[in-house]
Image (cartoon, rainbow, N blue to C red):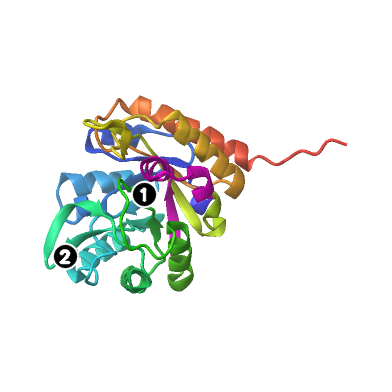
Amino acid sequence: MRQGLTAGLSLKPPHVAEALAATAQGLWFEVHPENYMAAGGPRLAGLAAIAERHPISLHGVGLSLAGDAPPDAAHLAALKRLVDRFDPALVSEHLAWSRSAGRYLPDLLPFPRTAEALGRIAENVSRFQDAIGRPVLIENPALYLPLAGHELPETEFLAELVRRTGCGLLVDVNNVFVSAHNLGYAAEAYLQALPAEAIGEIHLAGHTADPQLGGELLIDSHDAPVAAAVWRLYERLIGRIGPRPTLIERDDNLPAFAELMAERARAQAILVRAAAPVVEHV
């Protein structure tokens, strides 16, 4: 696994002191770089303290790679400054858009997977990588309703994006589970179709049922523990591709740090088992 990373956690301000004190082997922390694009202040100082003790990952939410315009130059420059300062173990972004005609929307929005979109996104990913001077990982989205106009299955779209740009994939297993449930396809088949060699990181998160539709529609809410079905998918994926850096992603309804570390320990145990050599009995 990259730079000794095993299982990590999203870093949230209430947990900085406990994160600083944590000593688990292979532990790493992921942050949204948009929260740290400042000249100074306590949040940036806290991240600097964490980075002295643990590897960090930058997981972007604002580049709008699937948008109708190139990534914002000022945003890329601010991201480059963070990359240069912290030398993160991983850098990633979402296969989505959130900006159009100068307006920003607070969501990660879907798009028709057309040949035109593939070309545009490949150009934007290449601009991203050129700007920060390293390969990045692109995350599969969570989807909630059918969208007209697709020309490629998502797995083929992602594989071709990897081929054209040299980027890798961040596979969010909860996103796969949520999308498969909402759109009516098999999550296991989706994961099997992804190119194993391109997968550089995995996310595990919780989901919730829609307040109005209930279990008919699942929401990638990041405010609950990882579901049993997502754990099963993850274990089978690791069994196929081998250990990969894995993040327990929690953004809301934060539990105690110890609870997150317990989920992290579960992922760690799966990674350790997958890495253990097979002993042949004669």
Task: State the mark number for residue 100.
Answer: 2
The answer to whether residue 38 is left or right of residue 171 is left
Mark found first going from the N terminus, 2 or 1:
1
Residue 78 spot, x, y in % from top left: 21, 63
What segment carries the magenta color? Answer: 167-191
Tell me the element at label 2: strand
Tell me the element at label 1: strand
Query: Label 1 belongs to which residue?
Result: 56
Residue at (33% x, 57% y) in the render: 93
Hey, what amino acid is under mark 2? Answer: Ser
Image vertical order of residue 117 relative to residue 265, above or below = below
Q: Can the viewer see residue 39 in this picture?
A: no
Residue at (35% x, 33% y) in the render: 21
Dominant secondary structure (helix, strand or loop) of the stretch shown in magenta: helix
Residue 264 included in the magenta stretch of the image: no
Residue 176 included in the magenta stretch of the image: yes
Hey, what amino acid is under mark 1? Answer: Ile
Mark 2–mark 1 Cα distance, whole angstroms, equals: 30 Å
Q: How many marks?
A: 2
Label 1, residues with CA under 10 Å away: few <14, some 14-19, many ≥20: many
Of badges 2 and 1, nearer the viewer stands 2
Residue 132 spot, x, y in % from top left: 33, 68
Residue, far right: 282
Residue 39 vs residue 1, the one in the foreground: 1
